[in-house]
């Protein structure tokens, strides 16, 4: 939806629709923290170093930068993913 090239600095917002029983597999992004927001459906999210958590509509999960994580859908799911680099400050 928006990203750094749109003048928002280190912030991006992506809307994703995942099919039933989809699995993104473990990923790691070093550039920014992420908030995963479930708009519709249900997903199970695994974040490195934490127990997997199930999320439904209007629930949010923080994924720190440089942390492996994966999403598995229970049915189909629609997500918003907000990434922010914090202006380079930690």
Image (tube, rainbow, N blue to C red):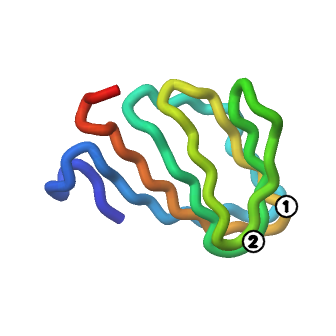
Considering only vertical position in the picture, is 59 above or below 83? below
77, 60: nearer the viewer: 60
Q: Residues within 10 Å of mark 1 (few under 14, many from 20)?
A: some
Q: Residues within 10 Å of mark 2 (few under 14, many from 20)?
A: some
**Farthest residue, direction left:** 7
Q: Position of residue 67 (x, y in %)?
A: 58, 27
Q: Position of residue 23 (x, y in %)?
A: 75, 47
Q: What SS does tag 2 mark?
A: strand
34, 4: nearer the viewer: 34
> Looking at the image, which residue is at 14% across and 55% down?
7
Horizontal side of 7 relative to 37 (left or right) equals left
68, 23: nearer the viewer: 68
> Looking at the image, which residue is at 52% across and 63% down?
80
Q: Quadrant of residue 1?
A: bottom left
The numbered mark at residue 22 is none
The CA span between labels 1 and 2 is 8 Å
> Looking at the image, which residue is at 24% across and 36% down?
87
Horizontal side of 20 relative to 85 (left or right) equals right
Considering only vertical position in the picture, is 39 above or below 82? below
**CB within 8 Å, label 1 to label 2:** yes
Q: Earlier in the sequence, mark 1 or mark 2?
A: 2
Horizontal side of 21 relative to 68 (left or right) equals right
Q: Position of residue 28 (x, y in %)?
A: 55, 29
> Looking at the image, which residue is at 85% across and 61% down?
74
Q: What SS does tag 1 mark?
A: strand
> Mark 2 — residue?
41
Q: Quadrant of the C terminus?
A: top left
> Mark 1 — residue?
74
**Farthest residue, direction front:** 90
Q: Quadrant of residue 63?
A: top right
């Amino acid at each position: 939806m928006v990203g750094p090239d749109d003048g928002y600095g280190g912030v991006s917002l992506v809307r994703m629709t995942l099919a039933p029983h989809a699995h993104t597999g473990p990923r790691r992004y070093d550039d920014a923290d992420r908030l995963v927001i479930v708009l519709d459906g249900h997903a199970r999210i695994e974040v490195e170093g934490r127990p997997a958590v199930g999320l439904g509509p209007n629930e949010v999960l923080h994924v720190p930068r440089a942390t492996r994580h994966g999403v598995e859908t229970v049915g189909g799911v629609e997500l918003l993913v907000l990434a922010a680099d914090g202006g380079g400050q930690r």
